[in-house]
Image (cartoon, helix red, strand yellow):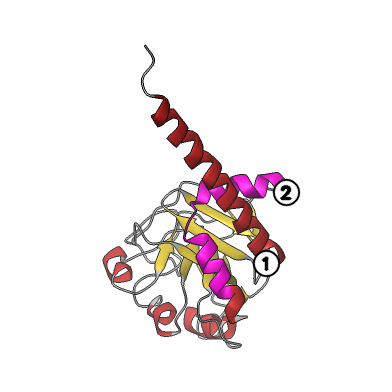
Amino acid sequence: MADMNDRVQDLASRVRTPDVVDAMGRTHRHRCHIDNLVSPTPGRVLLGPAVTISYFPACRETLPPDQYSFSRLFREAVRDGAQGSVLVLAANGYPDVSLGGGSKLALVAAHGLAGVLADGRLRDFPEIAAYDFAAYCLGQTSRWGGDVVTPFETNRPVVISGVAVRPGDYVFADASGAVVIPAAHVISALEEANRVAQVETDFVEGLRQEGPAD
């Protein structure tokens, strides 16, 4: 497993999200890309296998907050170990609501996760930026979202901005957006992404060597 993780990290270090999306398009026909993300950690790359938390409309009577809390659901999501993983937060139709902030996401740092991908908003960008992980979401908000949605279940397949994410699928995100790669194909997809990137580099270099047209 360590050798595989090293190989994934090495391959990913030489590509960008568009390269991976192009590579996925050559072998997979399903939607895999997520656009229009913002980040409190610009410049950081997010990479790792997914663990998921799915949110549900809040209801204190049927979903009591002491049972359906972020801390409890997070610990359930990572109970088998999740160092280097990506916490995927699925808003389920509430893209403008906060799914977490600086205090809750301290758990991500404490457990050594690679970071967070959320299809809702996050609070406390300065606090999140101070942690040693990468985070991507749909925007920043100042308002708590616990009266609208609540963490509901963990490590089930979720849909993020129209993209299916299964626990264990790899998430790759940078300033260009995010892409989700099926776990069984992460090496082959990243190898193909490296070929895509090399072809583009060679093309640009060829144009430079041609020089300006007379």
Where's the C terminus, which quadrant? top left
Q: Amino acid at mark 2?
A: Thr
Q: Is residue 138 left or right of residue 33?
A: left
Please name whichever residue, 166 or 100, is drawn nearer the observer in this view of the structure. 166
Q: Residue at x 37, y 57 (%)?
A: 39
Residue 57 appears in the figure: no
Does residue 127 sit above or below 191 in this rendering?
A: below
Which residue is disc 1 drawn over?
183
Q: Among all residues in the image, which is located at the extreme top?
A: 214
Q: Amino acid at mark 1?
A: Ala
- Give the residue at mark 2: 27
Asked whether 106 or 57 is in front, the reply is 106
**Does residue 161 appear to the left or right of 126 in the view shown?**
right
For residue 22: magenta? yes
Residue 65 drawn at (x, y percent): 51, 80
Magenta-drawn segment:
5-31
Q: Main secondary structure of the magenta part?
A: helix
